[in-house]
Amino acid sequence: MLWRFRREIIFVIGLFLSVMIVRHHSHRRVYNIENSQGEEIKTTNYEELIAENIRLKEILDLKKDVSLLKKKVIVGQIVSIKPIIFPAEIIINKGRNNGVREDMAVFSKEMFLIGRITNVYQDSAFVKTVFNTKTKISVIIDTTREIGILEGGSIPLLSLKYIPSDSNVKEGDKVITSGFSDFYPKGIEVGEIVRIEQNTETLFLNILVKPFSCISAVEEVLISE
């Protein structure tokens, strides 16, 4: 009788310890520990990963671009912009450790094009924005389906090149990525045409485009291929 009572006590104690161990592993946070060689080891932060996935689902508008969900999407925070107004370059807090690679496209949470990754470090990356003077993006006018090249450097607007002078393009037409660029997926909204002028010296129109993404007010970005 005494032996049975002891076995029941041992069973209860073992069950309690098992529950505590499971709870400990299910609520693991990030801790930096050192092994016998003094090397730092990082355990997995499950809570942070779950929170980031929830945030990603809140940001993405499924009705706007379902195809983007088929690819890896990384949520990043902007930590620096230069210059402060209509920045040509921004720095984000995600890098090689998070799966960021050069030439990945960068969008606002509304799925407007911001630019592309140019330099990647362990925990940060540089983004060349649409305002950068070296930016050249293959785009399509949504109404006429004509293809042109969108260039930065005309702050606060962008310059749309190589649209024929007899085009039916009009102010208010949207400009979207064509998919022919090496860096940007097809169908991403870039901006709206705000000015059209004839150019008697060439066979093409002078067209200015206002970007949809006001980068100076953006805090979070999406990074994807």
Image (cartoon, rainbow, N blue to C red):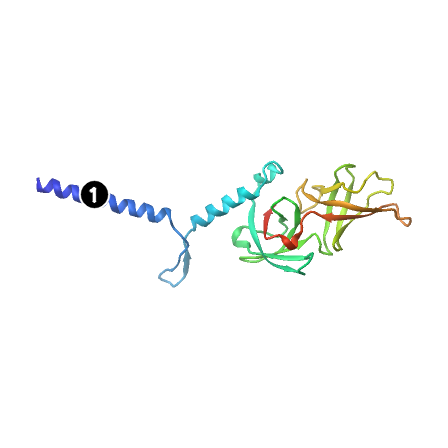
**Residue identified by numbered label 1:** 12
Residue drawn at (54%, 42%) of the image: 58
Residue drawn at (47%, 47%) of the image: 51
Asked whether, in this view, residue 5 is left or right of residue 116, the answer is left
Question: Residue extending furthest bottom?
Answer: 38
Dot 1 alpha-carbon crowd within 10 angstroms: few under 14, some 14 to 19, many 20 or more? few
Viewer-closest of 40 and 193? 193
**Residue 5 position (above or below residue 39):** above
The amino acid beneath tag 1 is Val
Image quarter of residue 5:
top left
Quadrant where the image shows the C terminus:
top right
Mark 1, secondary structure of its residue? helix
Image quarter of residue 187:
top right
Asked whether, in this view, residue 146 is left or right of residue 84, the answer is right
x, y percent for residue 3? 10, 42
**Residue 77 position (above or below residue 171):** below
x, y percent for residue 208? 79, 49
Viewer-closest of 216 and 66? 216
